[in-house]
Image (cartoon, helix red, strand yellow):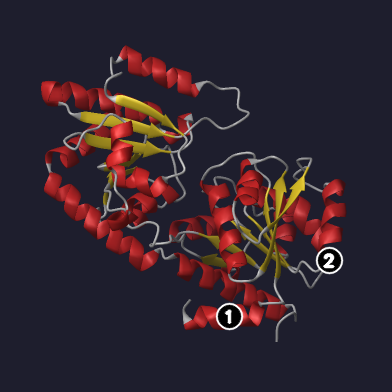
Amino acid sequence: MAFGLAERVDALEGRLDELVVCLSHSWGGLEQVAAQDAVDRSALGLKVRALVLEGSPIHQNLMQRNSAVVPIPLSFRPRDLLDFRLKSELDRLFKSGVNVVHTHQTTLLGTLIPWMWKYPQVSAFASRHIINNHDKRDFIHRLLYARLDYLLVMSQTLRENVMATHPLRERQVKVVNLGLDFSVFDPDRVDPARQRAAWGADPETLVIGLVGRIDPAKGQATFVRAAAGVIKALGDRAKVKFVMVGEETLGRASNHLGELKEMVQQFRLEDHVVFAGYQENIPEVMRSFDILVMPSRQEAFGLVAIEAMAMECPIIISRGGSAAEIVGEEEYGLLTRPEDAFDLQRQLRHLIDHPEVRAEMGRKARAHVMAHYDRQIRIDRTLELYSRALRRRKILN
């Protein structure tokens, strides 16, 4: 642990009592970041509780991990505004010592903030994970955001979006980059042979991957159309596998997975497309890809992008959101137009036809991620902001 972080933890130990709030039944980047952040801070000896929906993926994940995070499962989904059942739970938690509330869903501020006004010693934090397309500078949102100590975002693009659409002061909005554990995301420690074999890919086969929940917004249909174009262009020499990792969101009525499988059959891609389902071994998955594609309609950031880059895997990502921040001047990855299978096919062909470009891009991508997306830096930056807020509220000297 770096000296600055160790010193900060010493000052907060026994004083910080954090409540992470993530009331979601999904298991995507938002939920995974919320869980990992909570686990990381508790691993330092800090007191962390997590308000979650009973039986949700994040609840199950926290229960399965060997961490000191204390899950507090709710048997109901609170309303977005003034939920009195939630008020009773929050009153109990505040009286038991909680002094920092950190929600990863800004939609919950309407049912969290009103019950916090009579507890001025409690700091309020929120993390925004998605681009906002609505003007929130109305009277109600001004009241809610006035009580917020800090809103945390994961990129400068998100910060600019928030400042343009939210009633927040400059000092309230802070960029805290996502962070990875580079002892886990280390390409030299991972042998991809087993995983590639499971997908039917021998050492000479090029593996092009997509990781994300099965959802129309994630661009899997664009991925399949681009795959069809690539296979047609390459003809008999097409030793390529297109692998989709992910599953449909639990509880949703759609059958987008079935639609994708029908597309694969229509394009006669059964020998080239693999539906790999949900996988937890993400470092191994990323090391097994030769190229990662993120063809989403819009991604605020994209955790899987930096996970792939950390494993020296070049990426192709849709323009918009923070994509330009991730790939720089396209030295760490390539950009493609959202929902444009022809443009994605063009970028794929460039990397397929130039293996030396792939290798160099992968090396540069890892160096870039290691310089800017270290988990220890993320932890330290967050705790620095907690310390500021607690000093402002007289919890710390």
| Disc 1 packing (10 Å; few <14; some 14–19; many ≥20) | some
Query: Which residue is at 38% across, 54% downward?
Result: 306
Rendered image quadrant of residue 273 = top left
| Disc 2 packing (10 Å; few <14; some 14–19; many ≥20) | few
Q: Nearer the viewer, residue 57 or 304?
A: 57
Residue 11, compared with residue 268, is above or below; it is below
Q: In the image, is 94 to the left or to the right of 325?
A: right
Query: Which residue is at 69% across, 60% downward?
Result: 145
Query: Which residue is at 60% across, 47% downward?
Result: 61
Residue 76, compared with residue 258, is above or below; it is below
Q: In the image, is 232 to the left or to the right of 159?
A: left
Query: Which residue is at 41% across, 46% downward?
Result: 282
Q: Nearer the viewer, residue 179 or 339?
A: 179
Q: CA distance from mark 1 to mark 2?
A: 23 Å
Residue 331, compared with residue 4, is above or below; it is above
Instruction: Pick out the residue farthest to the bottom.
Output: 397
Quadrant in which the C terminus appears: bottom right
Q: Earlier in the sequence, mark 1 or mark 2?
A: 1
Instruction: Pick out the residue farthest to the top.
Output: 266
Question: Which residue, given by chain and number where applicable, does mark 2 sit on?
Answer: 96
Q: Nearer the viewer, residue 164 or 8?
A: 8
Question: Which residue, given by chain and number where applicable, does mark 1 sit on?
Answer: 8
Q: Which mark is residue 169?
A: none
Residue 384, compared with residue 108, is above or below; it is below
Picture coordinates of residue 367, whole percent (x, y): 28, 63
The amino acid type found where label 1 is placed reads Arg
The amino acid type found where label 2 is placed reads Ser
Q: In the image, is 143 to the left or to the right of 67?
A: right
Element carrying mark 2? loop
Picture coordinates of residue 91, whole percent (x, y): 86, 59
Picture coordinates of residue 257, whole percent (x, y): 47, 23
